Image (cartoon, rainbow, N blue to C red):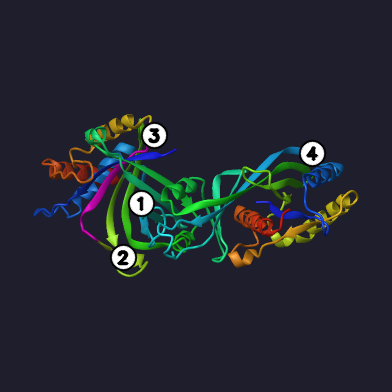
Amino acid sequence: MHKYYFFFQRFLKTIFYSESRFTASMHVEALQVLLQGLCGGRQEKLKIHEICLKSGTNLGVEASEVHLLCSLSQTDPVWTVRHVGGPMRGAGAEQLPAHVRSVLESSISSNALRFFYALGYKMDYELVRIGYVFQFQRVVPITVTATMLCKVPKLHAIDEAIPVTPGIQLVELTAPASTENYSEAVGAISSFAEHLAPLIHLSKPGVPTGVVPTASTAAASLVSRGAMKVS
Amino acid sequence: MPVKWLCYWQPSGGTTVSSQVLVDLIKSIESMNGVRSGRWQVTASQHRPIRRDQAVQVECARELLGVAFSEAPNKYYFVLRPDHMVVEADSTIQSIMENLQVYRNHLTVVFEGFQYQLGDFHVKAGRAVIAHSENLRGIVLEVEYLPVSSLGKTHQLMQEFVDIWQEVAAQSMTGRIVHLEPNFGDYSLSDQYSWQHTALQYISLMVHFLSQRTN
């Protein structure tokens, strides 16, 4: 079954306040508190080494791209190969508040990179995503990730990865759907995004949004509530 | 995972393999009190790279071999022989490869037949045919020993089983059972048996059958 993923993206900007109790990462921490509250604490750390591969010269019907993802948050690395199709087009797609793209994924053994090199693929770029992921069930399974994208200074030197935009995280909401139920998934993801509205506005990739006016106040309130829970 | 040996029937000099051979081998299993427990199928494919411009060479593997097992429907395996690589993936990898459109299916061999239970052994007997044809390329026999996963520890016992089966078959047939044993170590596969071992065995058998002369 093809899965369609809805992408809501927003770069969550951190704002540095002059008051000493607010830190540069306050909005990120606030989002974490909010999401923990919404999903009952089922948060997982995320550290993924992502390698984008492009087909070599003259190989294939047309040029193609495939992504290898190595999850480093467990004891043993877990490899996945992902192929993402182009976004759904047409008047209907324009009306939707999210991008709809066909995504195919497969787990794969740890020799995946050597395999795709042997098939004639070449590495285009690699990066490391570090952050956290939450899973929700709202009509459809919804995945929320907030990650920092880090560039890798030397080939595969993932321990030396440095953030591309320090202090800024990419927030993504994705939900799987089939051709029969994607309108339900759109509704579910839009309604879920409203829960995050006090803190961030989420939109289709490529559609800019500003910082939410209430963000700072909302963040401060969430962080102090979160601190009280911990103690 | 239980150890499997993959064998094929080698007809005696001057004769070619036929469906009658399979019938006789099944009779030999039943004469050893084997109980039929179902059907099985393995599909092995040979893929070749697609070049947009035929005049220009491409730096890539010239042959990509893949195999799927009816007993493991959620998995797919690739073998690249020059690179000594076995790759394991979910069955969705086939859809990914179709979308990428970099390799095209050149030929498929279907192995299919019946399986039998004999105490701690499972035995499969079947034929290998080119897909969508009745072009018989060989007779395949698989022996599985359920209690043990170590290739080293089961070698002697498996050889004894095959020897006994050979004696029983020889009562009514000429020819012999040949054990096909790839060099698992070359492919970084360990002594503990796995589906990756099985993938390499069936791919090796497909290559063997395709290299044999047919009528």
State which tag comes first along the sequence, 3 or 2.
2
- The residue sitting at the left extreme is A18
- The image position of residue B46, as x and y in percent, is 57, 54
Q: CA distance from mark 1 to mark 3?
A: 28 Å
Label 3 marks a residue whose chain is A
Residue behind mark 4: B35
Q: Nearer the viewer, mark 2 or mark 4?
A: 4
Residue behind mark 2: A152
Left or right, residue A98 beside residue A118: left
- The image position of residue A31, as x and y in percent, is 24, 45
What amino acid does circle 1 point to?
Answer: Lys
Q: Nearer the viewer, mark 1 or mark 2?
A: 2
Q: Are marks 3 and 4 in contact (CB under 8 Å)?
A: no
Residue behind mark 3: A178
Q: Nearer the viewer, mark 1 or mark 3?
A: 3
A180 above or below B211?
Answer: above
Give the residue at x 31% y 53%: A131
SS at mark 1 in the image: strand
SS at mark 4 in the image: strand
Left or right, residue B208 beside residue A76: right
Q: Nearer the viewer, mark 3 or mark 4?
A: 3
Tag 1 and tag 3 share a subunit = yes
Q: Is residue B195 magenta?
A: no
Q: Nearer the viewer, mark 3 or mark 2?
A: 3
Left or right, residue B205 beside residue B177: left
What amino acid does circle 4 point to?
Answer: Val
What amino acid does circle 3 point to?
Answer: Ser
Q: Which residues are magenta?
A: A164-179
